[in-house]
Amino acid sequence: MYKALSDVFDQVIRECNEHNAQFQSLIRKMVEQNLDIETTRNDEHYGAAVHHLSLLRNKRCLMAYMYNRAEVIQSFRWKIGPVLPHEIQEKLQFSEKEYFKNHSAVIKSYMSEMDIDLTVDMVPPKDPYIQVRVLEDIGEVSLGDHSISLTKNSLHFLRRTDTEQFISQVTSSVLVLPGHEELEKPHAF
Amino acid sequence: MSSWEDDDSAAAAAAAAATTDVELLKRAWRNEKASPEILRFDSALVSRVREQIQLLEETLDDFGESGVDDLVVSLYQMDLDRTLFLLRSYLRLRLQKIEKYMMHISKSEDLLSRLSQQEQRFAKSCTEMMEKHLEQSVLSKLPYGYDSVTRQSLSSTEDDMVPEPQLDTFVFCKTKSDVGAFQLDDIGEEVVDLVADDLYVLRYKSIKGLVESGQIDLI
């Protein structure tokens, strides 16, 4: 994900408005000459068509740019979690941050309606137990009937379902040994 | 002779296994994964699987209290974990597909009817969010006539800016039973004989009906 190109973006918007002004003035010219806009094929008509098509092209590019970024932002909810790390936050525009927040809320409300957490279990489970190494201090964690202390660099053999909440975040605080923490690859539709 | 009997009993066991709800869910999951468009949501199946998951969880709790062998417990746990994964992955897959084609789905009654109640709400809110976002970031800055989210401009006669699934993509599929001579196109120039348990690579569009009626599985 790159920082949003707001300068270029504004430039293209300005270009769009310029195209539109030119387009309008050419159409006006034709109207002043009492020509039928639908059927006349003179210089003004083709000029207007070029401005119109350029505007459409610019619009498609702008939309594709924002839409693709929005798709990446959607995937963050699945890959990273409801809170984005600072280095991603600062690359987003205001509207994109809003979108992420709203979109997360929609997923959250779906999960609470269905009463199921879909952000865990991203990889097919192989074994009910996994060996993990703790990357950052997490502290005392209660697991069902007992609690363990997850201190930095300690090794544990735990139930997979108990550790999942620490693994699912990209800024992972727990490392799975031997590495099978790859996220579920979205199938190419 | 005995190997014949073995084969028969194995086949019978496989047939019995194929009818369990988990197997059905696995099939639905596989079809959903391979199909370019969203398929019909089987609410009854999902709620049955959820009941079974709950039952398994209760059984496991009972095991914990009565001190059953750890190995047995971990086998049950594994079974539970796998079923849970399947369910989550299935629901997740559908949400991601809805995210991808939200506008296309939201404007078609037929497609909307394939979603569960919750998914319909999800699709609706998702579309609203996306439209609001695009409106804020791009469309509100464009001149009048070019500010529609679904059309390129006022002169477009139909929605030409909505991402749609590619239905004529090729899919791998396996027939469950004999279908017989099957017509792949509208004019009947391409006909293929679909034999039971055979593998094919065909255009999704042409076998769509067979997938929906459950005569063929995508893989």
Image (cartoon, coloured by chain):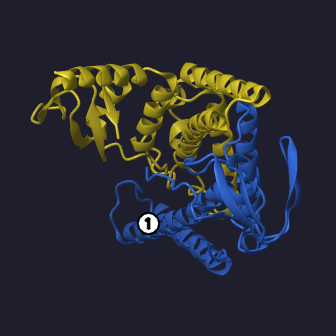
Chain colours: A blue, B yellow
Residue type beneath disc 1: Leu
- Output the chain of dot 1: A
Residue at 43 percent of width and 32 percent of height: B27
Q: Residue furthest right?
A: A140
Q: How dense is the environment of label 1, judged by Cα within 10 Å: few (below 14), some, or many (20 and up)? A: few
In the displayed structure image, the side of residue A74 where residue B163 appears, left or right: left
Q: Quadrant of residue B135?
A: bottom right
Q: Residue furthest left?
A: B189
Instruction: Please tell me which residue lies in front, A88 or B84.
Output: B84
In the displayed structure image, the side of residue A20 where residue B179 appears, left or right: left
Quadrant the N terminus of chain A occupies: bottom right
Look at the image and tell me whether residue A135 can be seen: yes
Instruction: Please tell me which residue lies in front, A112 or B20.
Output: B20
Residue at 74 percent of width and 75 percent of height: A87
Instruction: Please tell me which residue lies in front, B198 or B218.
Output: B198
Q: How many marks?
A: 1
The relative height of residue B155 versus residue B38 in the rendered view (above or below) is below
> Horizontal and vertical percent for residue A126?
55, 48
Provide the residue designation for mark 1.
A53
Q: Quadrant of residue A25?
A: bottom right
> Horizontal and vertical percent for residue B161?
48, 52
In the displayed structure image, the side of residue A105 where residue B141 appears, left or right: left
> Horizontal and vertical percent for residue B177?
24, 23
Residue at 78 percent of width and 68 percent of height: A154
The relative height of residue A23 versus residue B178 in the rendered view (above or below) is below
> Horizontal and vertical percent for residue B31?
41, 36
Instruction: Please tell me which residue lies in front, B63 or B30.
Output: B63
